[in-house]
Image (tube, grey):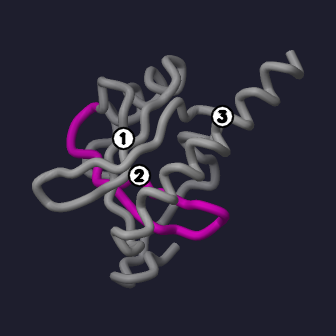
Amino acid sequence: MTLPESGVTITILPKPVVMEFDLVDADVAEVSLGQCLLFKLTPAAAQDLYRLTGTSQGRRLVLALNDTVIGARRIDRPFDDGTIATFVEVPDATLPELAMRLKATSADIRRTLSRER
């Protein structure tokens, strides 16, 4: 996959690590390098992410939305707090709406899944 702005090419695995139903929250965070998306995961997804990042340091987590890659985050440590902060290659002005849509989609999917059980 190729990132849209930087043109960085990244090889991805065919199986996603985190899916929409794994998100509890999505928000915009301001960090020293600028704005990024901050995802909070369900406890089960957080545990899976911790195991993956503990053994995959130096690799990247890639953010794909609707089959379009928009960001990547290098795994620099085990992610042990159930959150993922990642920079995305979209204009900063669009981040609040993007986070809101991700949050709404995730909530809709979790509601649907809980009714099916």
Instruction: Report the mark closest to the observer, 1 or 2.
Output: 1
- Kindly report the distance in space between the C-alpha atoms of the residues bearing marks 2 and 3: 22 Å
State whether residue 86 is above or below residue 90: above
Asked whether disc 2 touches disc 3, contact meaning CB atoms under 8 Å apart, the reply is no
Q: Which residue is mark 2?
A: 61
**Residue type for callout 1:** Ile
Q: Which residues are magenta?
A: 60-78
Q: Residue at x 41, y 61 (%)?
A: 95
First-in-chain label (3 vs 1): 1
Instruction: Report the mark closest to the observer, 2 or 3.
Output: 3
Q: Position of residue 4 (x, y in %)?
A: 45, 81
Question: Which mark is on residue 107?
Answer: 3
Q: Position of residue 42 (x, y in %)?
A: 52, 23
Lateral position of residue 56 relative to residue 46, left or right: left
Looking at the rendered structure, the secondary structure element under dot 1 is strand
First-in-chain label (2 vs 3): 2
Q: Quadrant of residue 87?
A: bottom left
State whether residue 5 is above or below residue 105: below
Looking at the rendered structure, the secondary structure element under dot 2 is strand
